[in-house]
Amino acid sequence: MPVCTRLVRPMSEPPAIEVRGLGRTFRRARTSWHRPGSAVSAVREVDLTVAAGERFGVVGESGSGKSTLLRMICGLDQPTYGSVQVRGRAVAGQSWRALQWLRGEVGVVFQDPMGSLDPRMRVGEAIAEPLLAQRIGDRSSREDRVRELLVAVGLPPEAARRYPHQFSGGQRQRISIARALAPSPSILVADEPVSALDVSVRAQVLNLLNDVVSRRGLTLVFVSHDLLVVRQVCDRVAVMRRGELVEVGDTARVFADPQHEYTRELLASVPTLPPLR
C-alpha cells in the first residue's frame, strides 16, 4: 500500500497539535520506609508540531514513551512540565471538566478494541456514548448517526443491536473507529490500532483509516512500533527513544536517509523494506 499524502492546510491556521518542552515523570513505589521511590522519566523535553490535515506518525520500541505522549496530547494524563495545545487551546494543566471541548475535537482509537468497548453495552450504545457526553442531538438523530457510522466503517446497521463479543477483532476495531468519529472530531489519534489484529485483517483496517481520514479531512496522529505500517500511513514521522524525540522529518527522508543511530538500528531490524511507490 503506498504512502498516502495530501495537502496540509495553510500555515495561517493554528497547528492541530503543538507540544513544547513536554515531560512526564512517574515515581516508583518506595521499597521501604527509609528508601523513597525513585523517579522515572517516561517523556522528556518533547517539542513537536502537527499541522492541520497532516498524517503524523510516532514510532519507537516498547517503553519508548509513545503512549504516554499520546495520553498527554489527548488530555488523559497531565504532564509534569511543559505545554500541550490542540488547535490553539491549552490542554496541559486543565481540569477534566474544562477539557470537555477536547473530547469532541479529538477521537481516539486504542490498541485493544475489546478493552475500550464496554462488554455490557450494545454496539449502538457504545458508538452513541460520545454524542450523549457532548449533548449532541436527540435520540432519533443519534440513532441515525450510529447507522451512518456503521455503514461508513463497513458494518451493517443492524450491528447496532449486538454486543462487542459477537464480533471479530477486526470488526471490533471498526466499531472503535466509528465511536471515535461519532462527535465529528477534527483530529483522529490511533494508538497501535492494528497491533492486536491478525495479519490478514490489518490491511483492511489500515485502508479504512486511510479512507476516513481522507474523506473527512482529518488530522491523523498514528502511534506504532511497526515501521512498515507508519511508512504506509504517515507523511511525517517522529522517532522516540527512552522518552525523547531523536529524529523528526518527512517519512520518505527519514526512511531513506536516517540521521540518528537509533533510527538506523530500527530500520536495520526490519526484515524487508519494499520501495516507496
Image (cartoon, rainbow, N blue to C red):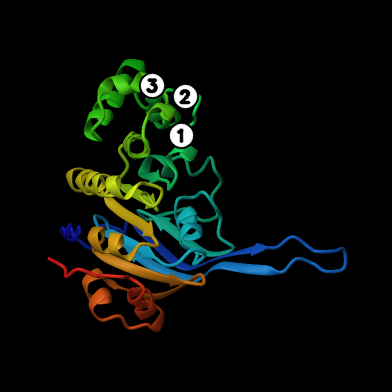
Q: In this view, does 248 lie above or below 87?
A: below
Residue at (35% x, 62% y) in the render:
226
In the displayed structure, 268 sits above or below 34; it is: below
Residue drawn at x 32%, y 20% as measured from the top left: 143
Q: Label 3 belongs to which residue?
A: 162
**Disc 2 residue type?**
Met
**Under tag 3, what secondary structure?**
loop
Observer-nearest residue: 245 or 151?
151
Residue 199, position in %: x, y?
31, 50
Give x and y (percent) for residue 257. 25, 81
The 10 Å Cα crowd at callout 3, few under 14, some 14 to 19, many 20 or more, is: some
Q: In this view, does 76 lie above or below 167?
A: below
Considering depth in this image, is 18 or 38 the residue closer to the camera? 38
Q: What element carries label 2?
A: loop
- Helix or strand or loop: what does disc 1 sit on? loop
Q: Residue 30 carries which label?
A: none
Q: Using the numbered discs, state the Cα–Cα distance from disc 1 to disc 2 in whole angstroms.
A: 8 Å
Residue type, label 3: Arg
Quadrant into which the N terminus falls: bottom left
Residue 148 vs residue 137, the one in the foreground: 148
Q: Do the residues labelled 1 and 2 touch (CB within 8 Å)?
A: yes
- Tell me where residue 152 sits by quadrant: top left
Q: In this view, does 85 lie above or below 48?
A: above
Q: Are marks 2 and 3 in contact (CB under 8 Å)?
A: no
Indicate which label's residue lies in the foreground, 1 or 3: 3
Mark 2 sits on what residue? 121
Disc assigned to residue 117: 1
Q: Position of residue 156 (x, y in %)?
A: 25, 25
The residues bearing labels 2 and 3 have C-alpha atoms spaced at a distance of 9 Å
Foreground mark, 2 or 3? 3
Disc 2: CA contacts within 10 A as few (<14), some (14-19) or many (>=20)? some
The amino acid sitting under disc 1 is: Leu
